[in-house]
Amino acid sequence: MDIIASDISKSFGDNRVLSGFSHTFRAGSITAVMGASGCGKSTLLSVLMGILKPDSGSVDRPERISAVFQENRLCENLTVSANIRLVTGKRYSCGEIAEELAKIGLAGCENKAVKELSGGMKRRAALLRALLADYDALFLDEPFKGLDAETKRTVMEYCKGKIRGKTVVLVTHDQGECEYMADETIEL
């Protein structure tokens, strides 16, 4: 199902962040959203997901969504595996989760508390949690931030394989990420 944003406007007080934004995010494709800091990319994602209500306009989207936010939003005292199972339920066994973690460089981390991980490890755990969820549309807000170049390449390859054929909206500042990941790029 397409995600259709029709004439979206959103302000915070006197600060108009989005003004008449319209776009059809095609089903099964990856659309990158780029723009300067503070131009409304994260706000747009929140409106598309239904977290923020637009001041005007409408959004049609699938009901089942998954997301990676700018913050990892992991439960720090739970293990990596437990964080993933919070959104996947019993869709994946502990062994399957361990296998997926190994593919993004987190082998042996499944039973570690999130608070014991580095920032880049937490980012990968948050991304994997979103990728393994049952969704029709995926929203990614700077999903590869904080990763060194080699890890980023590995994670981007993994991610691209996992999201093939899914409807994805990717917010990034990185032109290279757009070129590698996206079928279409729009500028805000």
Image: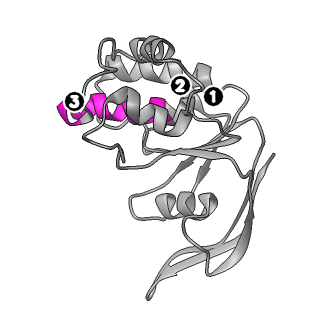
Q: Front-most of 67 and 26?
A: 67
CA gap, disc 2 and disc 1: 6 Å
Image-quadrant location for residue 109: top left
Amino acid type of the residue that numbered disc 1 sits on in the rendered structure: Ile
Q: Are marks 2 and 1 in contact (CB under 8 Å)?
A: yes
CA gap, disc 2 and disc 3: 20 Å
Specify the farthest residue to the bottom.
14
For marks 2 and 3, give the one nearer the viewer.
3
144 sits left or right of 63 in the view: left
Q: Is residue 10 visible?
A: yes
Amino acid type of the residue that numbered disc 3 sits on in the rendered structure: Leu
Measured from the top left, where is residue 185 in percent x and y?
A: 62, 43
Instruction: Please tell me which residue is depicted at 61% across the width and 63% down the height of the picture.
Output: 50
Number of the label disc, if any, that sits on residue 163:
1
Magenta residues, as a range? 115-129
Q: Quadrant of the C terminus?
A: bottom right
Number of the label disc, if any, that sits on residue 159:
2
Residue 146: in magenta span: no
Amino acid type of the residue that numbered disc 2 sits on in the rendered structure: Cys
Image-quadrant location for residue 178: top right
Looking at the image, residue 160 lies above or below residue 29: above
Q: Front-most of 30 and 108?
A: 108
Q: Earlier in the sequence, mark 1 or mark 3?
A: 3
